[in-house]
Image (tube, rainbow, N blue to C red):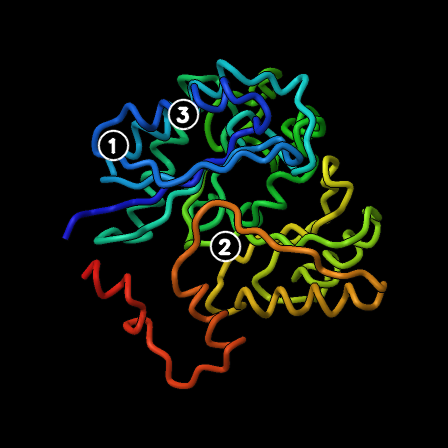
Amino acid sequence: MARIVECVPNFSEGRNKEVIEAIVDEVRRVNGVKLLDYSPDEDHNRTVVTFVGDPENVKIAAFNLAKKASELIDMRVHKGGHPRMGATDVMPFIPVSDVAMADCIEIAREVGKRIGEELGIPVYLYEDAASADYRKNLADVRRGQYEGFFDKIRQQEWKPDFGPDEMNAKSGATAVGARVPLVAFNVNLGTSNIEIADKIAKTVRFLGGGLRFVKAMGVKLEERNIVQVSMNLVNYEKTAVYRAYEMVKMEAQRYGVPVVGTEVIGLLPMKALIDCAEYYLQIEDFSIDQVLEKRIVE
């Protein structure tokens, strides 16, 4: 069985197509790596990239992407709806096939060390790769965002794991980690009132007393003049996509606001969608082996 690692870097550019393509090209150029998807978002001003490959070539592609992003993105002028602290904002490594979480932790440390030392960018390890428990949660690491990190980085407890102990003004800071697959799932609401989206997000997310494996925030979609509840489901098997959707929908009804659509950012495991189909269609004893495409691939 081939050893396969997934990498899902997020970089802080979602509007300039030439810059986006130049950064993603760094993945395309590496043999032994397959680009699966990249999803630019103009409102978030952010692009999510997904690629897989053998561990050694994934490490090369990940570093090259971070290097190109540091050359082409200037955080001093960056604005967007999504929390961010760096040109390459986050870079998680995920075990897929014949690779253990321990392997991904080691990959995160190797790549993080290169980014810190060779690019002069402060690097923070997070999730399973975190150097301390209080650094596991990405939201805690990124709190303060780019603008606040110039002061935050001076605090002893927020000294970077790799790289300089001062903020890189152009490239910001980068979080590099190892984690299980997550689902980036957004619910769009039929209102332009961002306060409603913020209140719903606070109710739905775990930190606000909501669903255990959900992180959420309100985002304004300027071009469509609506708002959304943007969520990361960090364990879709324990908190299903349909459960998060139904809670957002229920909370929106309190404010007389309809759900006008949803979106998935990047890729998601087939099981996450199978769980939704099983729930909404009330299919009894359904098996993933009943999916035609899965049987053909096998």
Q: CA distance from mark 3 to mark 2?
A: 22 Å
Q: Amino acid at mark 3?
A: Leu
If the image is split into quadrants, where does the C terminus sit? Answer: bottom left
Q: CA distance from mark 3 to mark 1?
A: 12 Å
Q: CA distance from mark 2 to mark 1?
A: 25 Å
User: In this rendering, is residue 93 above or below 151?
Assistant: below
Quadrant position of residue 272: bottom left
Work out which residue is located at the far bottom of the displayed protein and give it.
284
User: In this rendering, is residue 188 above or below 248?
Assistant: above
Q: Determine which residue is flagged by label 1.
A: 57
> Few, some or many C-alpha atoms within 10 Å of disc 1 (few <14, some 14-19, many ≥20)?
some
Q: Residue at x 47, y 54 (%)?
A: 182
Q: Amino acid at mark 2?
A: Val
Label 3 or label 1, whichever comes before in sequence order: 1
Q: Amino acid at mark 1?
A: Asn
Q: Which mark is residue 183?
A: 2
Q: Residue at x 51, y 47 (%)?
A: 132
Q: Is residue 277 left or right of residue 81?
A: left
